[in-house]
C-alpha cells in the first residue's frame, strides 16, 4: 500500500488536471472574439508621459483603461492565470515524484532549472532560445481547427507545437518560475508593420531595458530596437487588463476604431 498510494494520488491529480485543461480548451474554442476598441492618447498632449522604461515596454501607459475593454483578450489571459496556478502545483509534485512526471513537464522544468542558474540578460536569452527550439510553429487553425486558442506551457510542450502567443506564454511562465518578478514581465500583443499581422511577444525588464523575447529570432533586442512592432495591449499579473496605447503609429484598422471613440 505504501508503494501504490503516491501513484494513485498522482493519477487522481492528472485526471483532475486533464478535465480542467479540456474544459479550458473547449471554452476557448467556442468563444467568439469580442470587438476590441483601441483608445489612443494624444501623441504629445494631455496625458503625461511616464519616465522611459518605468512601467511597461514600448512606452505603454496605464491611463484611461476603462476606455479599452478588449474583453476577449483579457478573458483569455484571466483563464490562463488559473491554469498557471494548476500547472505550478503539477510541477511541484513532479519535483517530489520525478518518475511520475509527464515528458512535457520534464522538458519545461529543465528549461526553468537551467534558467535559474543564470541571471539578467543571460537568463532571458536562455529561455528565449530554449523555448524557440522546443516548439515548432503551427497556426491554431491547423492545430485546433479554430482561429485562436491560447495554450498553457504544459499543453504547448505536450503537443510540441504552437503559434506566437503560445511561445510568449511559455516564456512568460518560465521566467516567473525562474525567479523573475511579475513587475518586470509583460505579455505584449503588437502589430508588426513589416508583416502586416498582429503578433505576441514576451517583454522582460532587465537593468532598466525591456528585452523582447520573440519566437521569430534568437537575438534579444530592446523595445527601442524593434520600431516595426506597434504595441496594442500589454498583460501582466496585476489584475489582468489591457493597457492604453500611447503610440499612435498604428495601422489604418486600429486608427479607424480609435476615431470612433471621439
Image (cartoon, grey):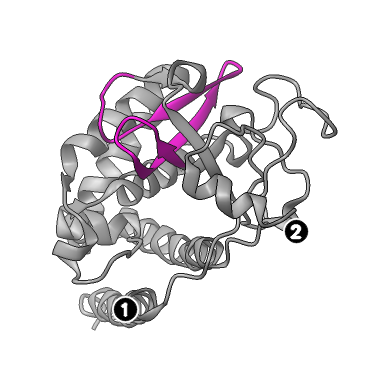
26 over 37 or under it: above or below: below
Q: Position of residue 12 (x, y in %)?
A: 30, 82
Q: Is residue 86 left or right of residue 45?
A: left
State the residue position of label 1.
9
Please tell me which residue is depicted at 64% across the width and 35% down the height of the picture.
60
First in sequence, mark 2 or 1: give its number: 1
List x then y, in percent, for residue 131.
26, 38
Frontmost of labels 2 and 1 is 2
Q: Is residue 65 left or right of residue 99?
A: right
Q: CA distance from mark 2 to mark 1?
A: 45 Å
User: Front-most of 244 and 135?
Assistant: 244
Looking at the rendered structure, which numbered label has been put on residue 66? 2
Residue situated in front as seen by the camera: 143 or 261: 261
Question: Residue 50: percent from the left, percent from the top?
Answer: 76, 26
Q: Nearer the viewer, residue 82 or 222?
A: 222
Q: Residue at x 21, y 79 (%)?
A: 4
Q: Classify residue 46 as left or right of residue 147.
A: right
Q: Residue 201, located in which quarter of the rendered image?
A: top left
Q: Secondary structure at mark 1?
A: helix
Secondary element under disc 2, as helix, strand or loop, is helix
Looking at the picture, does residue 189 appear above or below residue 193? below
Amino acid at each position: 500500500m505504501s508503494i501504490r498510494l503516491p501513484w494513485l494520488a498522482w493519477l487522481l491529480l492528472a485526471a483532475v488536471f486533464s478535465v480542467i485543461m479540456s474544459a479550458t480548451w473547449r471554452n476557448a474554442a467556442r468563444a467568439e472574439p469580442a470587438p476590441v476598441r483601441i483608445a489612443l492618447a494624444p501623441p504629445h498632449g494631455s496625458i503625461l508621459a511616464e519616465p522611459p522604461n518605468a512601467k511597461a515596454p514600448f512606452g505603454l501607459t496605464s491611463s484611461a483603461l476603462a476606455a479599452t475593454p478588449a474583453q476577449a483578450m483579457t478573458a483569455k489571459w484571466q483563464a490562463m492565470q488559473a491554469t498557471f496556478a494548476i500547472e505550478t502545483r503539477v510541477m511541484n509534485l513532479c519535483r517530489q515524484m520525478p518518475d511520475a512526471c509527464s515528458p512535457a513537464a520534464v522538458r519545461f522544468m529543465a528549461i526553468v532549472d537551467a534558467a535559474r542558474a543564470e541571471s539578467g540578460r543571460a537568463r532571458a536569452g536562455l529561455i528565449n532560445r530554449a523555448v524557440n527550439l522546443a516548439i515548432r510553429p503551427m497556426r491554431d487553425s491547423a492545430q485546433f481547427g479554430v482561429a485562436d486558442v491560447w495554450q498553457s506551457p504544459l499543453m504547448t510542450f505536450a503537443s510540441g507545437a504552437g503559434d506566437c502567443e503560445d511561445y510568449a506564454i511559455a516564456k512568460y511562465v518560465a521566467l516567473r518560475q525562474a525567479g523573475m518578478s511579475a513587475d518586470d514581465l509583460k505579455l505584449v500583443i503588437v502589430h508588426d508593420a513589416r508583416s502586416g499581422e498582429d503578433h505576441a511577444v514576451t517583454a522582460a525588464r532587465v537593468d532598466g531595458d525591456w528585452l523582447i523575447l520573440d519566437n521569430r529570432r534568437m537575438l534579444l533586442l530592446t523595445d527601442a530596437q524593434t520600431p516595426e512592432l506597434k504595441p496594442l495591449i500589454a498583460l501582466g499579473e496585476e489584475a489582468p487588463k489591457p493597457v492604453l496605447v500611447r503610440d499612435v503609429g498604428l495601422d489604418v484598422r486600429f486608427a479607424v476604431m480609435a476615431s470612433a471613440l471621439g
